[in-house]
Image (spheres, grey):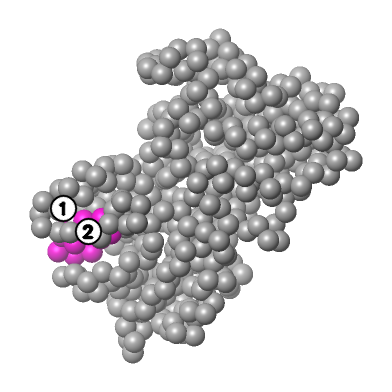
Amino acid sequence: MSGFFAVASKKDCVFDLFFGTDYHSHLGTRRAGMAVFSEEEGFNRAIHNIENSPFRTKFENDLPDMKGNYGIGCISDYEPQPLIVRSHHGTYSLVTVGKINNLKELTEEIINNGTHFLEMSGGSINATELVAALINQKDNFIDGIRFAQEKINGSMSMLILTPLGIYCARDRLGRTPIVIGKKEGGYCASFEEFAYLNLGYEDEKELGPGEIVIMTSEGVKTLVAPGDKMRICTFLWVYYGYPSSKYEGISVEQMRYNCGSLMAERDSETEDADIIAGVPDSGTADAIGYSNASGIPFSRPFIKYTPTWPRSFMPTMQERRDLIAKMKLIPAKELIEGKKILLIDDSIVRGTQLRETTEFLFKSGAKEVHARPACPPILFGCKYVNFSRSTSEMELIARRMIAKEEGQDVSRDILEDYANPDSARYSRMLELIKEEMGFTSLKYCRMDDMIKAVGIDPDKLCTYCWNGRE
């Protein structure tokens, strides 16, 4: 995942840009960068590796050298950003959020037209550089942005910093958000709405799907009107979004609370549970909602240790990521020993971390551990927002269990039957996952309840990772 932030101000924008970008640290773990433009000094940029250090500590020494009225910033799980590009459009800087499934094909197509790319250390092409190359195929930014979004199989939102203003373009189906904030003397554009509130901005507007605007210190002008069709990522509410975030006017914290409440209404197996616990932090609101609806006390039998373990300290190797995640959780054994615990997490993807959490609860004296993931089983790898680092759907625990029953070559009809919470196949899949994970019992949040918890038109929500429907 990635997040970005932009500022257009009558005064120097660097302070707001620095903290607005920093407020996106929960969305990226590897690279971060900022670029600014001033009429006196032109473009200036800084990019750092943030795998072993928080954003603020890496960039605070750059601030005295960065001055400008316009700026963009990004925190990313993948490619270094922002880029500074020189083309027939003039010099500009670019940041992107999204996923390009046909990156190899587009790269070869552009190379055949005489363009070259700089290969990153991992051997891949910087996706943001590819977006710039696509934009440069057209005579102006508007046509270039639309051309890039049409050519890309996946999704792509972007911010383009130019001497005349900042172009903000939400992807064609609005899978990821861009929201505009306003205060006296300037405007900002942000992935996360909450990122600008403490900086004195107020909500101005949320871009619609496919909308393109240009933002200056004087105002925001729509260049391409929003489309009618939307497929915003539901997993933003389930996991990615910070609790204080909201998308399409719907609070992340409220959605998770609603989800927990709806799960409790359907659950009759754990009325004798001693406590409800949420896996911190994204499972906490679901657990409180479940607790309040069921009357079972909420408790914190383990605590996430955060003073020296920031979100950004996450190695890229999955084995090490799992170890770091485990090391962050510290048990409060007095609240665990002899207890029947109902454990709520936002989701189960591969299952590694939750299995280790369950083992650690039993080793700490828990009598029972009942798991209640706050979204349905994940059956499909995301094609749109770099959902996870999984390179194969066989890394998903639900698909591994299906493969045990059906083999790896499974038809779409059978997969849809496994996605149906009322089917025998679904029940069998849950039984296998329960055994694999060591739970006392297992129930997932149903799709209809999750959608109800969001509370917007279901046709506007992307649920591809659960049911494979685009």
Q: Looking at the picture, which amino acid does disc 1 mark?
A: Ile
Contact between marks 2 and 1 (CB within 8 A): the answer is yes
Relative placement, left or right, of 326 versus 31 is: right
Q: Does the magenta stretch include residue 139?
A: yes
Disc 2 is placed on an element classified as loop
Residue placed under numbered mark 2 in the picture: 117
Q: Could you tell me which residue is drawn at 33 percent across and 74 percent down?
A: 165
Q: Kindly identify which numbered label has been placed on residue 344.
A: none
Residue placed under numbered mark 1 in the picture: 110
- Quadrant of the rendered image containing residue 290: top right
Quadrant of the rendering where the C terminus is positioned: top left
Q: Which of marks 2 and 1 is nearer the N terminus?
A: 1
Q: Is residue 288 visible?
A: yes
Determine crowd level at label 2: few under 14, some 14-19, many 20+ residues with C-alpha closer than 10 A: some
Determine crowd level at label 1: few under 14, some 14-19, many 20+ residues with C-alpha closer than 10 A: some
Magenta span of residues: 129-145
Question: Is the residue 90 above or below the residue 41 in the image?
Answer: above
**Distance from the alpha carbon under mark 2 to that under mark 1:** 9 Å
Question: Is the residue 335 above or below the residue 268 in the image?
Answer: below
Relative placement, left or right, of 419 versus 306 is: left
Residue 123, given in percent of the width and then of the height, sits at 31, 51
Residue 258, given in percent of the width and then of the height, sits at 66, 38
Q: Which residue of the protein is positioned furthest toward the left in this rendering?
A: 113
Relative placement, left or right, of 141 versus 454 is: left
Q: Looking at the picture, which amino acid does disc 2 mark?
A: Phe
Q: Is residue 170 magenta?
A: no
Residue 464, given in percent of the width and then of the height, sits at 43, 33
Q: Is residue 203 or residue 253 the one in the foreground?
A: 253
Residue 211, given in percent of the width and then of the height, sits at 34, 55
